[in-house]
Image (cartoon, helix red, strand yellow):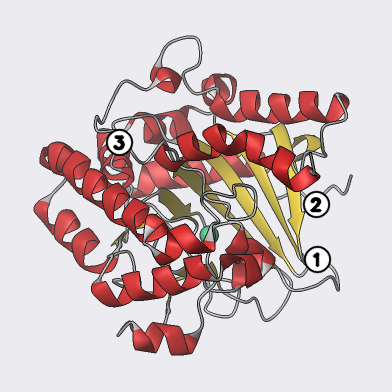
Amino acid sequence: MTTSSLRWLLAPLWAAQIFTGAKSFTDNAVLGSERLNRRGLHVWRVKLANRLADSRRARLAGRVPAADREAFARDGFVLKRDFLPPELFRAIASEIETSTAPAREMKQGDAITRRIALDPAALKRMPACAALVASPEFQNLLRYVASYDADPIIYVQTVFAQVDRSAVDPQTSVHADCFHPTMKAWLFLHDVEEDAGPFVYVPGSHRPTPRKLVWERAMSVRASKLDRLSSRGSFRVGAKDLKRMRLPPPQKFAVPANTLVVADTSGFHARGRSERPSTRVEIWAYARRNPFLPWTGLDVWSLKPFKGRQAPLFWAALDRLEKLGLGKSPWRDAGVITAASPPVRK
Ligand SMILES: [Fe+2]
């Protein structure tokens, strides 16, 4: 048997992954099949995942104000200025400035992202952050956009832009994170300047319109010939393609401190280019589950022994794999530090 025919022993696994969030066209020969994608496999997954997300969201709709639902349906994000009462916001900002906690760092291009998990141990020492994490207004909006009644993973995140002369941070090119609806949220702790790497988003680009689906099909057919991140399932998109899809140019979120942005990052977005070295501290949340689940709840990570511990368990699992010689964890241990202390390179 040749290596390529041996590879096809994985076919049942590849086929089963059709009904998961698996997105890489290069790791799965079924998802990456030019013939199947010409016949509409990828587009079918996009459409089904969106239909299921719409139906899950409809069930969570009663938990968020109508204005937020309308903004989300139109734009793919909800932006709320002055989100927290000023006293709570100030308490959170000073708590984050002074608290030390176990941190991890990842370097991508010339940017370093640091994350501190707001897990039960950290929240015990950070009562103001704990009040935010427990706030129904915060949780309900994140869950609505995620389309799941499941705990989002919440971190304090610091983005250090232009730390050296490495290649450009790949997050600065406009892209979709994956083929199905998914949620990321940012509560900015400082004013975000337009030239200091703000979040950017193409309003309305989360919708699977006929024109977007034409583009999705074309991308899926030539997925193996695209750049590395596109062929791994995070399609990069250019200005010409946005025009063809009748989408507007990306909008920059130069916003004041205490602004919350909750977005479906299957819509086109990026980290804006920073004109200079800069540091941005934010509370950042993320939720992604199998996009083909018909129900909103039944989340094992929301149960007692695991609740709030997804991030440290994930990091520990990556460390374990590294010790076993199965790849290198991108999330390096940065020790016990504050969110804004200078980057630790390991
Ligand atoms: Fe992204």
- In this figure, what is the number of numbered marks? 3
The quarter of the image holding the N terminus is top right
x, y percent for residue 97: 62, 44
The residue carrying mark 2 is 343
Q: Amino acid at mark 2?
A: Pro
What is the crowding at mark 3: few (fewer than 14 residues within 10 Å), some, or many (at least 20)?
many
Residue drawn at x 48%, y 39% is 15
Residue drawn at x 40%, y 38% is 19
Callout 2–callout 1 Cβ contact below 8 Å: yes
Callout 1–callout 3 Cβ contact below 8 Å: no
Closer to the chain start, of discs 1 and 3, is 3
Q: Is residue 344 above or below residue 253?
A: above
The residue carrying mark 3 is 148
Alpha carbon distance from label 2 to label 1? 9 Å
x, y percent for residue 180: 38, 52
Is residue 315 rendered to the left or right of residue 146?
right
Residue drawn at x 52%, y 50% is 23
Mark closer to the observer (1, 3): 3
Question: Depth check: 316 or 188 in front?
Answer: 316
x, y percent for residue 20: 44, 38
